[in-house]
Each structure stands twice: as C-alpha cells, then as structure tokens.
Amino acid sequence: MEKNSLYEALEKVRKVNPLVHNITNVVVTNFTANGLLALGASPVMAYAAEEVADMAKIASSLVLNIGTLNPQTVESMIIAGKAANETTVPVIFDPVGAGATSYRTETAQRIMSEVKVSVIRGNAAEIANVIGEKWEIKGVDAGTTANGDTVTLAIKAAQTWNCVVVITGKEDVVSDGETTYLVCNGHPIMTKVTGMGCLLTSVIGAFAGVEKDLIQATLSALTFYEIAAENAAAQTAEMGPGSFQIEFLNQLALVSSDDITSHASFTKVNR
Amino acid sequence: MEKNSLYEALEKVRKVNPLVHNITNVVVTNFTANGLLALGASPVMAYAAEEVADMAKIASSLVLNIGTLNPQTVESMIIAGKAANETTVPVIFDPVGAGATSYRTETAQRIMSEVKVSVIRGNAAEIANVIGEKWEIKGVDAGTTANGDTVTLAIKAAQTWNCVVVITGKEDVVSDGETTYLVCNGHPIMTKVTGMGCLLTSVIGAFAGVEKDLIQATLSALTFYEIAAENAAAQTAEMGPGSFQIEFLNQLALVSSDDITSHASFTKVNR
Amino acid sequence: MEKNSLYEALEKVRKVNPLVHNITNVVVTNFTANGLLALGASPVMAYAAEEVADMAKIASSLVLNIGTLNPQTVESMIIAGKAANETTVPVIFDPVGAGATSYRTETAQRIMSEVKVSVIRGNAAEIANVIGEKWEIKGVDAGTTANGDTVTLAIKAAQTWNCVVVITGKEDVVSDGETTYLVCNGHPIMTKVTGMGCLLTSVIGAFAGVEKDLIQATLSALTFYEIAAENAAAQTAEMGPGSFQIEFLNQLALVSSDDITSHASFTKVNR
C-alpha cells in the first residue's frame, strides 16, 4: 500500500461525515462521541432493542463494544448487527475483556457467530480468547508479557472469521488472512487514558463507513489515530495523562495529510 | 426585554444553587454535571423508577433527555414528569434524535402528551418531527440544509404545546407562541463537542429553577451559554475541540454580568 | 502514623497496578477510570449479574457506588460484594445520595447489612443517613451547615459497622472506631468537579488493594488525593473548574513521595 492512499480515507471521512452507530460501554461514550466529532464523523449512540435496527440501517457503519455488557445490550447488539448485515453496513467489533470472565468470552463468541463482522479489534489476549486460546488477561488490559506471536494469531483469526483482524499493542497487526501489516506508530502514554482502544475501534468504523477496501480503511484509521497520539504526546506527555487526553482530541481534528505521509510507519509482513 | 434583566437570572442561579434533577443520556452525564456545577447549579442524576418521583419533588427543575432512551428510563421520565407537575417543578425536555427512529419520535410525542413540559429544546428537525412534520435528520444532528422557516415552526410548536420552544441552530429561536426572540450568539465549534445541546437544555433547567418568567429564564440561559462559548472559542478554537471543551467549562464559571450586557445579541421578532 | 509510611502505599500501587473492580454510577465512570489509570491502578467496570462475581474474585479490590442505582445494578453489587467477601477482596462502598430518597437510604443500608464492607466513604449527611440519623442532604451534596460533630459520627459508624469510615468535607475524618484521624488537605474547587468524591472512593480501593492495614491505606489515599488536588489548584484554580479537572488527572500521575512528606496535614484525634 502506498502512503498517499492512507490519507484518502481520512479526507473522505472529513468530507462525508459518516454516521457511526455505536453500541458501546458506559465508560467511553463521551470520549468516543467527542473523538468521532473531532475527526469529522457523526456519532450516534442508540441502545434500545426498539430502535437499534432502524438506526443501524441508516448508519454508515455499526460499532459493537462489550466493555460494560449486559443481557439487554447484547440482544440489541445482535439485532443491530443482523440489520447492518442485511443492508451491507460494515460491523466493527471490540471484544473488550474477552477472557477476563466467561460471560465476556462467550458473548464475544456469540456475536462473532451470529453477526457477520467486517473488522474485529482487540489486544492480543482478547483476540486469542475469542478464538478459543487461553492468553493471560488482567481485567480489560492485555497481560504485559506476550504469550505468543501476534502475527500468527492475527492471520489465524482472520482466516477463521473471514474478516479483518486488528491486534493492538506495542506494535499493531492488521490482517485479512492473506495480507498482513505491522504498524509501529503510537506512544506509551496511550495506555494511561481509558477508552483509547475503544475509540480506535469507532474510528475504524468511521473509515470503514467511507472506504470499502477494509484493509485500506483499517490501516488508514490506525496510522491516522496513532500519529494523532504521537503529535499529542510530543506536546503533552510530560504534563500528564489529563493534558494528553485533551490534546489528543485536538489532534484528531488537526492531523493533516502531510503528517500521515511523513510519519506513517508500517511494513507488509511476508509470510 | 432589557439586557440588564438577562443576568439577573444568572446571579440567582449562582446564589441559590438550584438542584437540577437530570434523567439524561449516557453520553453526556459527566459533561452535564460538570457544566451545571461550573455554572453554580447543583446537579443530580437519578434514573430508577423507585426514586425519581421523590427526587423530582425536591428539585428546582427536572430535565428529561432521550438521547439514549430505553423502556425503563422512559417510564422513569413519565413518573418523574408527573411528580414534577404535581409540585409545580418546571420540566425541561430535550427530544434528542426525534425523527431518526420511530421509537424516538413516538417516545418524544408520548412525553409531550403525558407530561406538562415548560420548555422544550431541540434542533429544527427534532422539534418538527415531534409535532408531526417530517424534516431531515441525520442521527442526532440536524440536517445541514434548512427544510423550512424555524420561526414559524417555533411559534406553531409553542402554540400547539402551550410551552416555551427553543430551536437551536446557526441562529436560535425562543418562543412562547406570542413573544418570539432570535438569538445570534454562539460559535460554530460548538457542533464539534458532544452534548453542547444537551447541556444547554440542563442549563435552561437551572435558570427555570430560579426564574418563573420562562421566556426570561430561557433567553437568559441561552445568551449566557453562548457567550461562554464565544469566550472559550476566542481563546481555544484554533487549538481544537478538546481545548475548547475544557475552556467552555471554565467560562461557565467565569462569564460575568458585564460579558452578558456587552455581548448578548438578540432581537424580538415582529409577527 | 509516620508521614514516611504514607507514601509506601502509593509506591506499592504504582508498582503492583492493582485491578480495581468498580460498579459505579454513569456520571463518573470515565473520570474514575482515567483517575485510576493516572494513579497507576488498573480499573475495570463490570456490572452484569452474569459476570460480577467472576470479576470481583480476580480483582484486588471491589468498589460499590450507588450514584445512579437501579434494581439490576444493586443485585449485581450484592452478588459481587458476597463474592469479594468469600475471597477476602476488600470492599469499598460509596453511599452516594443516601438520605436524598428513601430508595437510596434503604439500598445503602441493605448493602451494609448483606456485604462485609472494609471502608465506607461519604459526606456527613450520607454516613449519618445510612446509620439512621437524619442529616440534611441536598441531592447528592452534603448540606452546607454541619448538623453535628463529624468525629463523633465517624467513630459511632465505625463501631456500628466494624469497618473504616471516611467522612469527607471541609475537614476529613478517618476512623476505625478506635483510632481516628483528621485530615486537613484539599481545596474548595474540588466541589466544582463532579465525581471528586466518587473517584476518591475508588482511589481508596486501589490503596486497599495493596495495603492490608486499612487505616494506613485510607489515610495514604486521602492525603495523596488531596495533595494532588492542592497541586492542581495551585496551577489552575483561577482558570476554572475545567482546567482544574484536567490538571488534577495530571497530578494523580505526578505527585511524588516528597510532595506527600512535605504537604500531608493530619492529626490523630484523642478521644
């Protein structure tokens, strides 16, 4: 993939303002909505079984996130996911905390089996647990020690589910099972702000809402997002995570095509 | 209305610290509470059917917001609204996303028919859909092209419901069906922060909790709020929406009577 | 207690990154998670009856907060609390708004009777109402006039419940019924940011997750937290509550052992 094509999806998002329907957790709703607005997307949160199918059908993409799941919201996710599938609205899924409790693991697996997901994003432990491998997880954070090879995991998961898999961590892996990329952008302070992963998943939703090539949409979203974090960290990392969080929202609005062309750091994996 | 009378309500809010009971959406709860605290009001969020009547009765005003509605919360809104009506606590209603799904439209209409609402605030599409006209809406954001005359819409809605109607947009309209004002304060970056409309509705609640003249309370709240946004934008708009959001909270605490007298921009509409 | 021992618990938190399971209200979830991350703890929010026992058992501490309680969440709190009790995970309880409605008062009393709570933190009105005294409360904020002697109240409550009681206000009281401390750190602007009390309760949870001496854990958490607020206020109080909130998150990451040794202000009460 050429670096120039990375920012085309960003420009489309800023021009089209895609409507991103989020069924997400109560910790990150505000941050997610503000991040999507800053980027140029149009967020909507709707959770009730009475309306999620209607909302998903008019959206550019649907984002499902089980960070604070409960039986009612899970039913709404299934209903919305099926409605999105009927109208070819891409579904992006964030299996927050899969592996931490059996309820999360089983719910994530149920969503993957009942809904056709276009992109799934998680840390290594979450992705591993959803495909049935037991990797260490601490609450909703990945274990600090790698339990295995994340590239192999991403390829296996992508082939199993026939979708794009994004595993984020110190390095990030994007794979559709055939083509695989490693992304090396980002900054360690991202782990000190809640919802940085959840918002990334919604940002992938925004990009997938305007760009049909899902590998390109995902890689564009990921490099854009992590370059915004790098810019924000350059200005604020020493001030602390509060200042970083606010500057990161600023940077989602400010990151330019030039920033992406000059700072995007990714390589194609040969396997 | 004289400009001098605009800040009297603000001074009352800061002196009395009215208790504002919010039944609002999960996206904006934190921002709403912080905005009300910054202004000098005392926010409380209470949602359970088991307690909303008790809380509404001891509040200075009740704010209902259907941004992430579900059947349980809607029942609580009806219960709280009726309790507020019994004790003449003013009810302020924000029909977020009415028109986007039939569930939202029907719920908004149900609340307007079962609860005596003092002030309703929405964008043009939301207000139009609640009175049964079909205006374009995109998720929870108003369509970018005006579908009609918002002054006529506000007057018609106010006469239909016998309440104060506030339609916010590039210009804002405030009408009780007889007297109508246009307000020209505010700043475009307000659309880049989630919950700016929702918090405005709660701020109207704070003002209506201390000022019985609802046109004066609403016009005071609106000019105060948008001047705070202008002040914040003057300092931060080029930095981005993250910095604006924080400075806006600061300005809710800092806007003075002088700011209001010198910057309030409104005209009475002759019809 | 020696000042030197105060920061030992802080250093343990930053080294161990305890997993703090929060069942808290929808207003403060984001702020709580960000505050715990800034401090060095690892927050997780999980609410569903289907998973709270599993999550509580793997956590270092469990924090229960009834700020926006409903029957489902209360059941989850009881289930999680009993699971924590079985595995000797300390339970920290914040009876937000007890006294404002009978539902809140009764629920707080039910939790105190069905779960073995290690530390309870509230304002004077909340603690008084949970033990059955009627103190004035305004929504979720303590009345501005003291209704009685908070030291006597804290000692009585600690003896009644056989746990550590923390009453926060202009001065703070920490008591286990035998040993009692007064803490004089903090800053008035703390009352202008929502969730400052709720986050403190969760921070006590983080400290109690690494330090078994609950008086030391609580006193360490309280002085650390309020010194962070003092530092933030010194830089931002004149700018407004928005800037304070962000700088406070920064300070949770930045406060040093030296800050604590030089600024901690507490006295043992002789009774």
Image (tube, coloured by chain):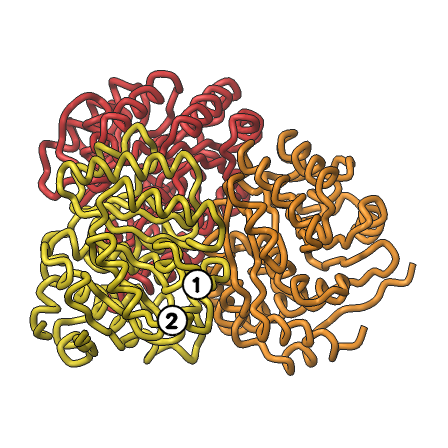
Chain colours: A orange, B yellow, C red
- Taking the spot 39% from the left edge, 44% from the top edge, the residue there is B107
Asked where in the image residue A128 lies, by quadrant, the reply is top right
Amino acid type assigned to the residue bearing label 2 in the image: Gly
Q: Position of residue B168 (x, y in %)?
A: 32, 67
| Residue C267 in view of the camera | no
- Residue at the (75%, 67%) spot, across then down: A216
Query: Which chain does the numbered disc 1 sit on?
Result: B
Q: Secondary structure at mark 1?
A: loop
* Position in image of residue B46 (x %, y %): 31, 38
The answer as to whether the residues below labels 1 and 2 share one chain is yes
In x, y percent, where is residue A260?
A: 66, 77
Q: Which residue is mark 2?
A: B148
Quick one: quadrant of the N terminus of chain C? top left
Q: Which residue is mark 1?
A: B135
Q: Can see residue A126?
A: yes
Circles 1 and 2: CB atoms closer than 8 Å: yes
C20 vs C231: above or below: above
Q: What residue is rendered at 46% in x and 51% in y?
A: C34
Q: How would you rate the neighbour count of disc 2 (Cα within 10 Å): few for under 14, some for 14-19, many for 20 or more?
A: few
Q: Which is nearer the eye, B262 or C232?
A: B262
Of C128 and C253, nearer the camera is C128
Residue type at tag 1? Trp
Q: Earlier in the sequence, mark 1 or mark 2?
A: 1
Q: Secondary structure at mark 2?
A: loop
